[in-house]
Amino acid sequence: MSAVRAARGRVLVVGAGPAGAAAALAAAARGAEVTVVERAFAGGNAVAHSLLPSKVRIAAARDLAAAAGWGAPAGVAAGGVLAHLRWRREAARAALEARLAQAGVTLRSGAALRFEGPGRAHVAAPGGEREVAFDAAVVATGSAARLPAGLRPDGRRVLLSRDLATLADLPARAVVVGAGPTGVEIASLLSLAGAGVTLVGRGRELLPGEDAALTADLGASLAARGVEMRLGREAQAYEPGEEGVTVVLAGGERLRADALFVATGRRGETEGLGLDRLGTAPDGAGYLAVDGRGATSAPGLFAAGDVTGPPLVANKAARQGAVAGAWAARSAGGRADPEPPRLDPSTLPVAVFAQPEYARVGAVPGREGYEVVEGDDREGLRPHVSGLLGWSARLRLAVDGEGRVAGAALLGDGAAEGILALAAAVAWRMPLARLGDLVPVVPSAGEALAALVADGI
Ligand SMILES: Cc1cc2nc3c(=O)[nH]c(=O)nc-3n(C[C@H](O)[C@H](O)[C@H](O)COP(=O)(O)OP(=O)(O)OC[C@H]3O[C@@H](n4cnc5c(N)ncnc54)[C@H](O)[C@@H]3O)c2cc1C
């Protein structure tokens, strides 16, 4: 991107997660004087508590399970995984701090911000308090776990996904409540690590709203690894104790475990920000409504990332941050970009890093009235090479009335990597027949595409 020079308007960014970091860099690239206020960890929850720690744990569990499948002796000290995790978090934080500094962005870490009125904010840091003036601001404060009433996480019996960043030992027996992306990832991770797991979901499907045929396959894979499913069941009471925890389901079933993981949803992190002093307010779930530029209803106030509501994913956060940062720089007195960056939610890929992985982009196959065509790689070579743990790939495409690709969902090892090619097909509404021009690598998850083509799409 070529930098568009602007007058040095002051842009204040609250939060240094993927959204805040991208907003700061985008505003700085346009000549704004940018300050980022981060109360905890540069890199945000993504690096400190959610994305990075969970993915490092999942990678470790997957590699260890694969090694055990090859006959390697069991057991790498959990301390080894934790130490590695800490190192990765610090490396990611340091890389971001260096990048912000290089871009001329001022980072105020360990400082909490609250708005005082238009153009004015109050920043409280251990070294003291100060007033900050700004011409435009970007709220990128992320999201936090939403818990059932009366339930308190204690880091031992009642756990949140963020505890994956610090737990020395994973529980031997766990109940996971919530069958959305976070609950499914945790259940999958724990089962790969050899734990006994019961997964409780209020809806009848895993990953509600996603491709039901593929999520049913995913459920079957988890069940085959020993995960006990309680779908369409409501957790009604929680009884944590010294020896473990009991979850009581509607109907009276009592599930006992060493620990409970709560993954029952999230809320926007907007409490105490003083948004009312700027003349705006979040919705009941704490989320801030924004338009395609990231602008809120308050003049000069933009927002990006989880705080703007679902989908709560880092790729959306980063792109939305870049968009909001560019518009905030302009609002602060800079010039307009000849081609402002934009976020097209209809081509945003999402992934769930269960084993097998699930990824989807665009229209959800089987849900939105499109024709569905599908293929899998069972006839290909990949399952024979990498199918040690029985993972193959299944691809389903949503095709519009003109025979063009409107959506794609992929289940299988490597789905998160493979979805980008399909995102291109969705973004450019590729005619289905043109997919036959693509020749996938063997072995790869793309062999599912080859099978689909061979079947004469
Ligand atoms: C278990 C788990 C796994 C996940 N895995 C993935 C994944 O694999 N891929 C993916 O794309 N997404 C994943 N996500 C989602 C991803 O973590 C979020 O979408 C992403 O972190 C959102 O980025 P953000 O910048 O909006 O907010 P965050 O990363 O939440 O950062 C917000 C920052 O704002 C700071 N802040 C808040 N209030 C204030 C204040 N008043 N003053 C100063 N600072 C403040 C916070 O300290 C925080 O550092 C996962 C989420 C969870 C829970």
Image: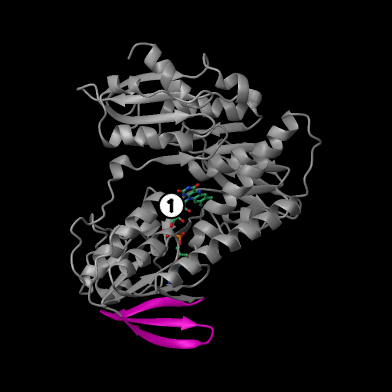
Q: Nearer the viewer, residue 255 or 182?
A: 182
In the image, taking residue 269 as reference, residue 41 lies left or right, namely right
Q: Please, is residue 11 above or below residue 254 in the view? A: below
Badge 1 crowding class, 10 Å Cα cut-off, few under 14, some 14 to 19, many 20 or more, is some
Q: Is mark 1 within 8 Å of ligand 1?
A: yes
- Residue at mark 1: 314
Q: Please, is residue 35 above or below residue 318 in the view? A: below
Q: Quarter of the image containing the N terminus?
A: bottom left
- Relative image position of residue 47 (x, y in whole percent): 53, 58
Image colouring: one colour
In the image, taking residue 304 as reference, residue 401 lies left or right, namely left
The image quarter containing residue 85 is bottom right
Residue 129 covered by magenta stretch? yes
In the image, taking residue 434 as reference, residue 255 lies left or right, namely right
Q: Which residues, given as a range, are shown in magenta?
A: 110-133
Question: Visible in this render: residue 171?
Answer: yes
> Of all residues shown, which one is farthest toward the right?
73
Q: Nearer the viewer, residue 5 or 281?
A: 5
- Relative image position of residue 350 (x, y in whole percent): 41, 41
Query: Which amino acid type is marked by label 1?
Result: Ala
- Relative image position of residue 9 (x, y in whole percent): 26, 77
Q: Nearer the viewer, residue 365 or 37?
A: 37
